[in-house]
Amino acid sequence: MTMAEAAPVPIAFCITELDRGGAERALSQLVLGLNRDEWSPRVFCLGPRGHFADVIEAGGVMVECFDASGLLSLPRVLLRLTLALRRFRPRILQTFLFHANIVGRVAGRLARVPRIVSGIRVAERRSRWFGRVDRWTNGLVDHNVCVSQGVADFAATQTGLSRRKLSVIPNGVEFETFAAAAPSDLTPFGVPVGSPVCITVGRLEEQKGIDVLLDAAVRVQAAHPNCHFLIVGDGRDRVSLQARAVELGQAATTHFTGLRADVPSLLAAATLFVLPSRWEGMANALLEAMASGLPVVATAVEGSTELVRSGETGLLVPAGTSVELATAICSVLAAPRHSRKMALVAQGIVKSDYTTDASVRAYCRLYEQLGVRG
């Protein structure tokens, strides 16, 4: 029997939440990119319904959410996931994000899922306990997919995972969505027509380094007084970051947009993209900016060092350094012709190597190598 004639392989995906975010978007793209003649996917979410639950269901894939609300709900969620997996009987379970990795691998073994693959999306530095729990439970896992080589190296050297069980599959983007986007009108945010605009997109939390960008903005505006900063996203630090912008005298030129559905058009309207993260996995926002043809300035963190060749496809600076970040931003603003050349090279790299289709194909190859059709 050929692959085309065989019944689609049932495959389960488990993720911590389905709100707007890079990992959630990556899972949605993977699930919806699978060939339904070969795969029969279903998605399980530990938390409540979020934006991508609707996106996935609109693509014809069932989503079941368990409404986790903290540690006290863990036994209930573990039981529900285990029972759901027993009913679905997948050949493989793919998990995304730390909490889903841990709960999913336990539930998967209790449900006797033949193959379990965990997705490691970030070099987690907030607490050593994340790495310890991952290491202690990794015997339940057949394989770990890391989103970048930097994350794989971190998982091996800092977490202690076996390199034999690690592989790298980078994020992918819907290239044409970003490359062909029409620019937004930024004047409703308070950006005058013709002003240079530095944009960043991400959660407003410590990891993303928005506070460092705010400090850098003061130095940038000393050289480029008409430069504006567009900060797209939301998170627990939004109020404190807005207060910091006021304290620095940047309230008139720093614009917090909140969550937006028109990110491709916002990127198309900007002058350059800045990723000031303290640590990463492989930032979807950076890939999207490169696909948009924007010059990029990024910190030299996991994923970014693989995407950006400093001076050729963008500029890299050390993480946490507002002075060097400001210097790099000013360099881009002062040399638009060279910056445009770097951006076009970067855009070509994304088009050839970092599309959603390329990512989906890599996952499918891995699943086949794990013998899920046996």
Image (cartoon, rainbow, N blue to C red):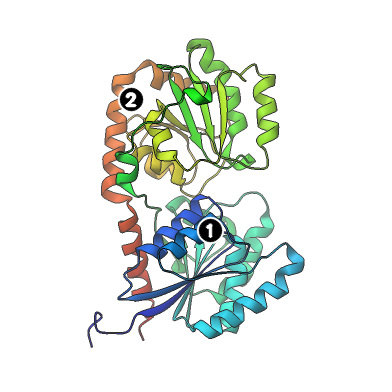
Q: Residue at x 36, y 70 (%)?
A: 366
One can see residue 112 in this view: no
The residue closer to the viewer here, 152 or 97, is 97
Q: Nearer the viewer, mark 2 or mark 1?
A: 2
Q: Residue at x 33, y 45 (%)?
A: 177
Label 2 crowd (10 A; few <14 / some 14-19 / many >=20)? many
The residue closer to the viewer here, 333 or 81, is 81
Q: At which x and y percent is residue 336? A: 33, 20
Q: Residue at x 53, y 21 (%)?
A: 190
Q: To which residue does mark 1 refer?
A: 155
Q: Is 281 located above or below residue 232 in the figure? A: below
In the image: residue 300, left or right of residue 82:
left
One can see residue 285 in this view: yes
Residue 354, labelled with which disc? none
The residue closer to the viewer here, 301 or 282, is 282
Type of the residue with mark 1 = Ala
Q: Quadrant of residue 304?
A: top left
Tally the numbered discs.
2
Report, in whole angstroms, how far the alpha carbon at label 2 lies from the one at label 1: 34 Å
Label 1 crowd (10 A; few <14 / some 14-19 / many >=20)? many
Q: Secondary structure at mark 1?
A: helix
Give the quadrant of the C terminus: bottom left
Q: Are dots 2 and 1 in contact, CB under 8 Å?
A: no
In the image: residue 46, left or right of residue 75:
left
Q: Is 222 located above or below residue 177 in the figure? A: above
Q: To which residue does mark 2 refer?
A: 339
Q: At which x and y percent is residue 224? A: 47, 12
